[in-house]
């Protein structure tokens, strides 16, 4: 396993560095930071920046490949229903708002 590289824009000076540690199996499988459906990171980012996390193509799936829903304890607390952004759009919105993301622990 390895960590993910830093996500930062060259044209936007970041004011905040968000540090992650040891991505989950889901994150490694998708090549995305915080990819597990019940990880609240992208939901919190969406609430702060005015969008909603879009499920991945094919929907959320369990480790065995069965369809699962976002946990009610997360969904019931979300502020925004729309727009729903794909992962790449969420990353773009986060970086444009002056945040940088970096996985600081490598295994």
Image: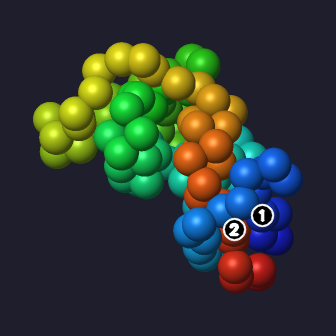
Q: Secondary structure at mark 1?
A: loop
Residue drawn 59% across and 58% down?
A: 99
Q: How many marks?
A: 2
- Identify which residue, 8 or 27, lies in the foreground: 8
Horizontal side, residue 97 vs residue 84: left or right:
right
The residue at 66%/62% (across/down) is 14
Q: Quadrant of the N terminus?
A: bottom right
Q: Is residue 66 visible?
A: no
Q: What's the coloring here?
A: rainbow
Mark 2, secondary structure of its residue: strand
At x 81% / y 49%, what residue is drawn? 11
Tell me where residue 34 appears, x and y as whole percent.
Answer: 55, 53
Q: Is residue 29 above or below residue 102?
A: above
Q: Residues within 10 Å of mark 2 (few under 14, many from 20)?
A: some
Q: Position of residue 97 (x, y in %)?
A: 56, 47
Is 103 left, or right, of 11 in this rendering?
Answer: left
- For the question of whether residue 70 can be seen, the reply is yes
User: Residue 78 at what x, y percent from top left?
Assistant: 23, 36
Name the residue carrying label 1: 6
The residue beneath circle 2 is 102
Tag 2–tag 1 contact (CB < 8 Å): yes
Q: Quadrant of residue 79?
A: top left
Look at the picture and state if 10 lies above or below 68.
Answer: below
Q: Compute the Cα span from label 2 to label 1.
A: 4 Å
Q: Earlier in the sequence, mark 2 or mark 1?
A: 1
Q: Residues within 10 Å of mark 1 (few under 14, many from 20)?
A: some
């Amino acid at each position: 396993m390895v960590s993910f590289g830093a996500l930062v824009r060259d044209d936007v000076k970041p004011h905040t560095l968000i540090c992650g540690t040891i991505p989950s199996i889901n994150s490694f499988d998708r090549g995305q930071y915080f990819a597990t459906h019940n990880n609240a990171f992208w939901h919190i980012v969406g609430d702060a920046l005015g969008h909603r996390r879009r499920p991945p193509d094919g929907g959320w799936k369990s480790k065995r490949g069965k369809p699962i829903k976002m946990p009610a304890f997360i969904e019931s607390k979300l502020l925004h229903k729309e727009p729903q952004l794909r992962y790449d759009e969420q990353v773009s919105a986060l970086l444009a708002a002056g945040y940088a993301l970096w996985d600081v622990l490598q295994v």
